[in-house]
Image (spheres, helix red, strand yellow):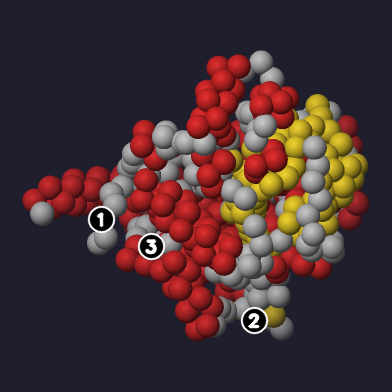
Amino acid sequence: MDIRPEKTAIEVHNLTASYNRKPVLWDIDFSLPQGQLIGIVGPNGSGKTTLLRNMMGLMKPDSGYVNLFGKKLDEVREKVSYVPQRETVDWDFPANVMDVVLMGRYRKSNIFKRLSKKDRDIATESLEKVNMLPFANRQISQLSGGQQQRVFIARSLAQQADLYLMDEPFVGVDAATEESILNLLSEMKKEGKTVVIVHHDLQTAYEYFDWIVLLNTRLVASGPKQEVFSTELLQEAYGGRLTVLSRIGDLMAKQDFPMRESEFKEKEGPGDERAS
Amino acid sequence: MAMVGDAISHAVLPGIVLAFLISGSRGNLPMLIGASIIGVLTTVIIELLHKKAKLQEDASIGVTFTWLFALGVILISAYTGQIDLDQECVLYGEIAYVPLDTLTVGGNSIGPRALWISGSVIVLILLALWRGYKGLVLTTFNADYAQALGISTAFWHFGFMGLVSLTTVVSFESVGAILVVALLITPPAAAYLLTDSLKKMLWLTALLGVLTAIGGYYLALVLDGSIAGAMATVAGILFAGAWGWSKLLKRLSFKSANLT
């Protein structure tokens, strides 16, 4: 199933991509709407992160292309912001929270220049939005997992983009962070921003997102969540893992999601949640 | 990454030999140029093996510099058999001789040659740090993000590696191989233990480097021993001190955190 939106934020056209000649994405073709919260969902190894990396131009596809707002990435780069997976950087790097958020103000055009007062104000505002302002001078090595994630999101907000691509922002975060991210997402949606999130958890996907892309190397479905969350499509994406499916099916039938990730993922990582 | 300097110090041998074969002289400038070019090439090959062949970084460093060093040895034995050319004589200086090799302009000595060459490299590096601080930090901390912003990570990586290569080549011409590696790695490692701020770390590294040089010189004077050896020893002692100090601070802050 592939439902086409009215106003397109991202168009993925016949995209095939591989690592070491093993195809990770096969002939993916879909379009994503503007101004919505979009989840890219699929089992482990289904190519979710690879899809995001291709959208962000971090990887060259074997064939096909991605257009953002109907243009090539290079023409609209300033309007697109990327939040990589938290684990991809060394958090022992000698820097504080503000240093990292200010990176959101770096551009190709100002990389050799000093940042302005305005850049600092925008970074401060962004930290405020994720409730991390009291931590501005904290070393990044002393943050908990959830705080690290919020710093990454603040950096992305500081870019003041129209389209945000986030890779697994809900992994290993505490309840406070989850809530703060969700509030932020609904606010961003109100401002007309488009947010694409790679997400591994089916159960929360339904409540977080408006539009869902189901992926398993091939595109299984892309459309409004009500259309995509059908037993057949989920089965197609998740294959034989019937236990997961039947549980989801039950939940779907009740339209009731009693289990939240936040309830068993309290507090991970070192650090504390207190403001200093 | 710390061992790249060590790798470069060996890998540049074929560059020196080729520079000699092409220029036909044992002058310093062609050798420096040859060594610097191969130094950058070394980092390119290391990067290539690491990224494209999916080799671990330490393994790619090991493969690259032994191979290039061996190439240099073969070139020497095959083409320069009659001439006294090895990297001990061309490349590895002895710090005690530095004051003897002076530069003369218009008949007047203007001081040790090494001082002028290293001085120019320092100016170049300070300029690069001043203008390129943001780019270097961004691409080191989070290369993917930099690339997503449209900033060329290759430009910054190889610019940085080129500076490392140049510094290494220029310094081991004057101070010898062991001291280069000792000074390239130990002071920043000690500074890293003492501060969380990158800017402070850079200043502290420079300070520790100066302390190492002065302390090592007087230690050698007292012991009547090798200057390079004494400096490397002092670097080690300073590192041990920094480590002890950071442990102490951690324990103290832990205690005070428990009290509150």
Q: Amino acid at mark 1?
A: Arg
**Residue visible at 52% across and 60% down in the picture:** A186
Same chain for the residues under marks 2 and 3 in the image: no
Rendering quarter of residue B32: bottom right
Q: Are marks 1 and 3 in contact (CB under 8 Å)?
A: no
Label 2 crowd (10 A; few <14 / some 14-19 / many >=20): few
Return the residue at label 2.
B108
Rendering quarter of residue A47: top right
User: What chain letter is assigned to the residue under label 1?
Assistant: A
Label 1: state its secondary structure.
loop
Q: In this rendering, is residue A155 above or below B175?
A: below
The C terminus of chain A is located in which quarter?
bottom left
Numbered circle sitting on residue A132: 3
Res B17 seen here: no
Residue A69 appears at what percent x and percent y? 79, 63
Residue B192 appears at what percent x and percent y? 40, 53
Q: Amino acid at mark 3?
A: Met
Nearest the viewer among A219 and B135 is A219
**Residue visible at 46% across and 36% down in the picture:** A257
**The residue positioned farthest toward the front in the image shown:** A254
How many numbered tags mark residues here? 3
**Residue visible at 91% across and 51% down in the picture:** B22
Numbered circle sitting on residue A274: 1
**Residue visible at 23% across and 48% down in the picture:** B250
Label 3: state its secondary structure.
loop
Nearest the viewer among B97 and A38 is A38
Looking at marks 1 and 3 on the same chain, the residue that comes earlier in the sequence is marked by: 3
